[in-house]
Image (cartoon, rainbow, N blue to C red):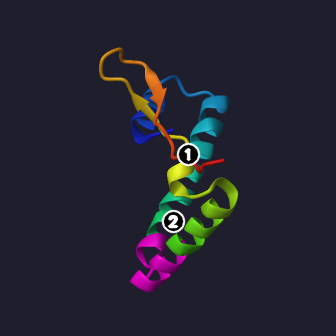
Amino acid sequence: MNLQGLSFMVTREQTVEMRKYLRQSEARYLEEKQKCEQQLEKTDSQIKAAIAAEDAELKRKFGGRECLRVIMLDKNGGEAVDKPRPAYCK
Protein backbone atom coordinates (compact mmCIF):
# COMPACT_ATOMS: atom_id res chain seq x y z
CA MET A 1 0.00 0.00 0.00
CA ASN A 2 1.32 3.45 -0.78
CA LEU A 3 1.42 6.50 1.46
CA GLN A 4 -1.66 8.02 -0.18
CA GLY A 5 -3.64 4.90 0.65
CA LEU A 6 -2.40 4.94 4.23
CA SER A 7 -3.38 8.59 4.65
CA PHE A 8 -6.86 7.76 3.36
CA MET A 9 -7.16 4.90 5.83
CA VAL A 10 -6.21 7.15 8.75
CA THR A 11 -9.10 9.52 8.01
CA ARG A 12 -11.69 6.74 7.97
CA GLU A 13 -13.61 5.54 11.01
CA GLN A 14 -11.21 3.85 13.41
CA THR A 15 -12.02 0.25 14.25
CA VAL A 16 -9.92 -2.52 15.74
CA GLU A 17 -9.57 -4.13 12.31
CA MET A 18 -8.62 -0.81 10.74
CA ARG A 19 -5.93 -0.14 13.37
CA LYS A 20 -4.56 -3.66 12.91
CA TYR A 21 -4.42 -3.16 9.14
CA LEU A 22 -2.66 0.19 9.57
CA ARG A 23 -0.08 -1.31 11.89
CA GLN A 24 0.64 -4.10 9.41
CA SER A 25 0.96 -1.59 6.56
CA GLU A 26 3.24 0.61 8.63
CA ALA A 27 5.42 -2.40 9.50
CA ARG A 28 5.73 -3.32 5.80
CA TYR A 29 6.57 0.28 4.94
CA LEU A 30 9.28 0.48 7.62
CA GLU A 31 10.74 -2.85 6.50
CA GLU A 32 10.94 -1.69 2.88
CA LYS A 33 12.41 1.64 3.98
CA GLN A 34 15.12 -0.19 5.93
CA LYS A 35 15.94 -2.36 2.91
CA CYS A 36 16.22 0.74 0.75
CA GLU A 37 18.51 2.47 3.24
CA GLN A 38 20.71 -0.64 3.34
CA GLN A 39 20.96 -0.59 -0.46
CA LEU A 40 22.05 3.06 -0.37
CA GLU A 41 24.94 2.18 1.97
CA LYS A 42 26.45 -0.32 -0.48
CA THR A 43 29.62 0.49 -2.37
CA ASP A 44 29.83 0.52 -6.16
CA SER A 45 31.70 -2.80 -6.16
CA GLN A 46 29.01 -4.43 -3.97
CA ILE A 47 26.28 -3.15 -6.31
CA LYS A 48 28.15 -4.42 -9.38
CA ALA A 49 28.63 -7.83 -7.74
CA ALA A 50 24.91 -8.04 -6.87
CA ILE A 51 23.92 -7.12 -10.43
CA ALA A 52 26.35 -9.71 -11.84
CA ALA A 53 24.93 -12.39 -9.54
CA GLU A 54 21.37 -11.46 -10.53
CA ASP A 55 22.31 -11.53 -14.24
CA ALA A 56 23.87 -14.99 -13.83
CA GLU A 57 20.71 -16.27 -12.12
CA LEU A 58 18.49 -14.79 -14.84
CA LYS A 59 20.74 -16.29 -17.52
CA ARG A 60 20.47 -19.70 -15.88
CA LYS A 61 16.70 -19.58 -15.38
CA PHE A 62 15.41 -17.69 -18.41
CA GLY A 63 18.26 -17.16 -20.87
CA GLY A 64 19.06 -13.63 -19.70
CA ARG A 65 17.50 -10.38 -18.55
CA GLU A 66 16.25 -9.63 -22.07
CA CYS A 67 14.17 -12.84 -21.95
CA LEU A 68 11.94 -11.64 -19.12
CA ARG A 69 8.35 -10.88 -20.02
CA VAL A 70 7.81 -7.16 -20.56
CA ILE A 71 4.33 -5.77 -20.97
CA MET A 72 3.91 -2.51 -22.85
CA LEU A 73 0.89 -0.34 -23.52
CA ASP A 74 -0.19 -0.25 -27.15
CA LYS A 75 -0.19 3.40 -28.19
CA ASN A 76 -3.00 2.96 -30.70
CA GLY A 77 -5.41 0.66 -28.90
CA GLY A 78 -4.45 1.36 -25.31
CA GLU A 79 -4.25 -2.33 -24.39
CA ALA A 80 -1.38 -4.26 -22.85
CA VAL A 81 0.83 -6.25 -25.24
CA ASP A 82 3.94 -8.38 -24.72
CA LYS A 83 7.20 -6.87 -25.88
CA PRO A 84 8.89 -9.22 -28.38
CA ARG A 85 11.74 -11.32 -26.99
CA PRO A 86 14.82 -12.65 -28.81
CA ALA A 87 14.42 -16.04 -30.49
CA TYR A 88 16.93 -17.77 -28.17
CA CYS A 89 14.76 -17.14 -25.10
CA LYS A 90 13.15 -20.15 -23.42
Report the residue marked by disc 1: 87
Along the line of sight, which residue is nearer the eye, 76 or 36? 76
Residue drawn at point x = 56 percent, y = 45 percent: 87
Instruction: Using a 10 Å C-alpha cutoff, classify the residue at mark 1 as few (fewer than 14 neighbours), some (14 to 19) or many (20 or more).
Output: few
Between marks 1 and 2 in the image, the one whose residue lies nearer the viewer: 1
In the displayed structure, would residue 40 be above or below residue 36?
Answer: below
Q: Which is nearer the N-term, disc 1 or disc 2?
A: 2
Q: What kind of residue is marked 2?
A: Gln
- Please give the residue where the numbered disc 2 appears in the rendered image: 34
Given the current orientation, which residue lies at the most extreme top position?
Answer: 77
As helix, strand or loop, the secondary structure at mark 1 comes to loop
Left or right, 78 with respect to 90, comes to left
Residue 3, by quadrant, is: top left
In this view, the residue in front, 14 or 20, is: 20
Q: Which residues are magenta?
A: 38-50
Q: Is residue 90 left or right of residue 6?
A: right
Vertical arrangement, residue 1 with respect to residue 79, above or below: below
Q: Is residue 32 magenta?
A: no
Percent position of residue 62, x then y: 65, 53
Give residue 39's position: percent from left, percent from top. Answer: 47, 71
**SS for tag 2?**
helix
Front-lying residue, 22 or 64: 64
Which label is found at residue 72?
A: none
Residue type indicated by callout 1: Ala
Cα separation between marks 1 and 2: 40 Å
Residue drawn at (66%, 47%), measured in percent from left and top? 90
Q: Residues within 10 Å of mark 2 (few under 14, many from 20)?
A: few
| Residue 50 place in picture, x, y as percent | 54, 74
